[in-house]
Amino acid sequence: MQQYHFLTLTALLAGVTLLSSCGEDDPEPVIIPPTESGLIEVDGGGAAYPNTAFIDLSKGTQTSVSRDSWDLAFATGSEFKVLINGTTGAMASATGETDINAVSTAAMSAADSAALVLSFTNLEGILHVDDPSMPLSKPAIAAVSATEASNEVYFLSRGASGVDAKPWKKIRIIRNGDGYTLQHAAGDATDFTSVDIGKDSDYNFVYFSFENGVVEVEPAKDTWDISWTAGTSSTPFPQATNGTLAYFFQDLIYQNIYGGSAVSEVLEEDIAYENFSVQDAETLPFNSTDRLTIGSNWRAGGGPSSSPAVKEDRYYVVKDSENNIYKVRFLSLTKDGERGKPSFEFELVTEDL
C-alpha cells in the first residue's frame, strides 16, 4: 500500500506553529489544519488500471491498492451484509442450498454459468452484482440471517474485468456472535474451509482474500473522501432484467458514503469554479447516499474518431466527515497519453472576506 502526500506550505507552517506553542505543561494535542489546496495525480497504476486509489482531501494524500487484492467485504455496522468485489467484475448467484458440499459448479447449466460473466450481452447481470450506487442497499448476497438455516450457499465468480481470472468459489456465510463465519471451497470440492471474521468499527468493511485471508484495502472510514477505480456500473437498458444493464467501466469516482462524505455537482455556467464560496455551498443539494454522484459524470466517453476526455463544464463540491468543504475539478484523464493516471485540483472552500 502506498501513500502520497501533498501538504501545502500553509498547512505545514500552521502545524509547526501549533507544535511550538505547546509547552511541556500543556497537554493540548497538536491539531493540523486541513490542507488548503493541491493537485493530485491519481495512482491508478497505468493503462491496465490495476489500482483503486483512496483519496483524503484534508490531508492531500492517496492510498492505492490493487483491485484484485480482495474478494469479499464484510460490513462492520449493525447490519450483517457482505459485498463482492465489483472492481474486478465479480458476480454471485444463490444456489437454493444450505449444504456447501451439496453443490458443484460442474452441475451448473450453461445458462447459469453465463449469467455470472459480466458483459454487455448478459441481460441478467444486474441480478448478480451489488447495487453499483448503494451496494449495501441491495447486495448480490442476501443479508446474513440470524437463523443459520436461512443462509444459502452462493457461487462466486471472482471477476475477470481488467484482471486475471481466478477460480470460482462456492461460499456460505453465517453469523458468529457480532461477527461472521465464512465457509468457502473450490467450486467442485467436497469439503470446505471455515474462517471467522470479526467487525472493526474503525473501518467501513473488513476485507477478505481467499489467498491471503483478512487484508487491508480501504483506509479507516473517516480518513478518505473519494476513490478512483474501475468497477461495475449500470445504465438503463429496456431489454435487460429490471430495465438495467450491468457493465464494467473504467474511471469511476466513488464517494465514501459509509464514512460521511457528501457530494454535489456544479456547472460552470451556474457558478464558476474560481468564484465558488461557502455561501454557495449552503445552497447545494449534497448527496450522501449515492456513491456514484461523481461516478463517470466527470468524463466524456470516446468514439470512433475521439478519445475519452474530461468534461470541462463542471466540477464537484465534496463535504468530508469533518464538514470540511472542498471544490474539486478534474484536469486530465491521462498522463503523457497513458490512461489510469488522471489528475485533479482541489481547494478548501472558505468564508468570503
Image (cartoon, helix red, strand yellow):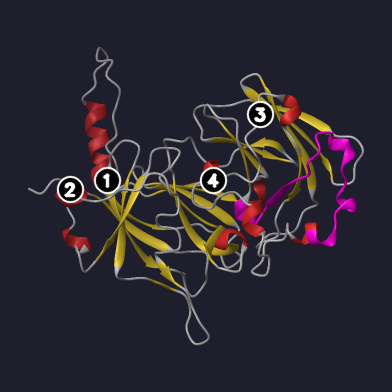
How many residues crowd around disc 4 within 10 Å: few (fewer than 14), some, or many (20 or more)?
some
Amino acid type at circle 2 is Val
Quarter assignment of residue 181: top right
Tag 3, which secondary structure? loop
With 94 as the anchor, is 234 left or right in this view?
left
* Mark 1 to mark 2 CA distance (whole Å): 8 Å
Amino acid type at circle 1 is Ile
Relative to residue 87, is residue 194 depicted above or below? above
Between disc 1 and disc 4, the foreground one is 4
Q: What residue does disc 1 label?
A: 325
Residue 145, numbered circle = 3
Q: What residue does disc 2 label?
A: 278
Q: Say which quadrant the N terminus sits in.
A: top right
Between disc 4 and disc 2, the foreground one is 4
Q: Earlier in the sequence, mark 2 or mark 3?
A: 3
Q: What residue does disc 4 label?
A: 135
Tag 1, which secondary structure? strand
- The answer to whether marks 2 and 3 mark residues whose Cβ atoms lie closer than 8 Å is no
Query: Which residue shows up at 66% across the image and 45% down it?
Result: 70
Q: Which residues are magenta?
A: 86-111
Query: Which residue shows up at 20% across the image and 65% down it?
Result: 270
User: Which one is nearer the viewer's eye here, 205 or 37?
Assistant: 205
